[in-house]
């Protein structure tokens, strides 16, 4: 057990009810104490996994992944408590309670059951009203979905043989859910069982500081979404001539500055940024800025291109302007200029890492 978590619970009065009990009375309530601890520990554990490998929260758009060290001590306990409290509020919402009661049979699902539920081809198409009287749980339904003569055809193979046809196409939307530490997406019909879940998860993600995939999982499994104190996304400008990838951060004001620095360094490491650009590279780029041109081929259908004078000519101009940093080897000069352009202007490797981080 985590001593820091026990200490946080004690300081916040979470154990006050038990501290004045005698030994015999306390022994009778050990199960209650353990249950209280385990609820906080579960949320804390999910948060630690999130900062080691699962997506950090984002402000909008696709996924951003962080690998910071787990939040521990008072910071981790505060986030765990806040996350648990919001889950308690959401649990009492009529729409959540109604979905669980009617669609899930008055219970929440295990991880295996939840995956079968969200990945069911039948539940992605068939409305709840057509399935509510089946003699089995919805995640146990088996069937096939296909197209015949422009119609969507659904045929149940278990628990009963049943066949439906829908004329024309189905209006699809994207249901997001967590799978193996990543965000998975499945297309679902808007009027289907999973379409109803998607609309509920989308609404919860707007009302609470949650990702939509977290909201989906909360509705199905009652897993309290980890409300990360740091939210970030990749933005920037990407063109044929230059790249400017940026990281946009949203940070809760109470987060210790040192902790934010650790998280940001973790993001930089994932982007391959382990050292600063040297002064020489910046000087080379400033020099090339005076000689670069853009050629626009007239009506040829070709893309515009960057042009520089021949390397030997550029080296002569450089040596004249920077006699204290002269080059003798034109190949070395060209190599240093190209490396500086890549690191400062094009940043193709960083941009590629941003895309991989964000889109998986």
Image (spheres, rainbow, N blue to C red):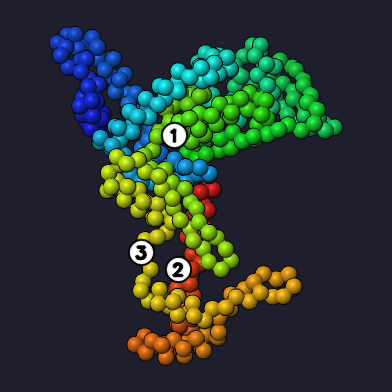
The dot on residue 238 is: none
In this view, the mark in front (2 or 1): 1
Give left or right: position of 246 versus 75.
Answer: right
Near-viewer residue (119 or 231): 231
In this view, the mark in front (3 or 1): 1
Q: CA distance from mark 3 to mark 2?
A: 13 Å
Residue position for label 3: 275
Name the residue: 45% across, 68% down. 343
Q: Residues within 10 Å of mark 3 (few under 14, many from 20)?
A: few
Q: Quadrant of residue 251?
A: top left
Name the residue: 41% across, 88% down. 321
User: Could you say whether the residue bearing mark 3 is in a helix, strand or loop?
Assistant: loop
Near-viewer residue (112 or 173): 173
The dot on residue 344 is: 2
Residue position for label 1: 209
Near-viewer residue (30 or 269): 269
Residue 36 in view (yes/no):
yes
User: Could you say whether the residue bearing mark 1 is in a helix, strand or loop?
Assistant: loop
């Amino acid at each position: 057990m985590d001593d820091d978590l026990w200490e946080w619970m004690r300081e916040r009065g979470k154990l006050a009810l038990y501290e004045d009990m005698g030994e015999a009375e306390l022994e009778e309530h050990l199960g209650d104490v353990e249950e209280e601890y385990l609820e906080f520990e579960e949320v804390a554990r999910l948060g630690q996994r999130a900062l080691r490998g699962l997506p950090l929260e984002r402000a909008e758009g696709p996924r951003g992944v962080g690998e910071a060290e787990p939040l521990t001590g008072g910071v981790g306990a505060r986030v765990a408590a806040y996350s648990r409290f919001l889950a308690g509020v959401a649990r009492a919402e009529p729409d959540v309670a109604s979905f669980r009661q009617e669609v899930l049979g008055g219970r929440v699902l295990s991880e295996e059951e939840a995956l079968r539920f969200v990945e069911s081809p039948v539940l992605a198409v068939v409305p709840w009203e057509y399935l509510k009287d089946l003699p089995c749980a919805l995640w146990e339904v088996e069937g096939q979905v296909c197209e015949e003569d422009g119609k969507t055809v659904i045929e149940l193979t278990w628990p009963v043989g049943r066949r439906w046809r829908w004329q024309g196409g189905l209006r699809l939307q994207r249901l997001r859910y967590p799978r193996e530490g990543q965000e998975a997406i499945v297309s679902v019909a808007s009027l289907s069982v999973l379409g109803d879940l998607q609309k509920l998860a989308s609404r919860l993600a707007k009302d609470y500081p949650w990702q939509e995939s977290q909201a989906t999982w909360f509705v199905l499994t009652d897993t309290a979404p980890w409300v990360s104190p740091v939210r970030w996304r990749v933005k920037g400008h990407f063109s044929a001539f230059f790249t400017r990838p940026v990281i946009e951060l949203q940070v809760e004001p109470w987060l210790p500055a040192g902790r934010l620095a650790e998280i940001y360094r973790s993001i930089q490491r994932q982007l391959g940024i382990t050292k600063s650009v040297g002064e020489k590279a910046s000087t080379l780029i400033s020099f090339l800025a005076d000689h670069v041109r853009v050629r626009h081929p007239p009506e040829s259908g070709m893309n515009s291109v960057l042009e520089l004078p021949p390397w030997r000519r550029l080296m002569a101009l450089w040596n004249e302007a920077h006699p204290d940093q002269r080059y003798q080897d034109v190949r070395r000069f060209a190599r240093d200029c190209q490396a500086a352009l890549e690191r400062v202007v094009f940043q193709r490797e960083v941009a590629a890492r941003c895309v991989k981080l964000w889109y998986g």
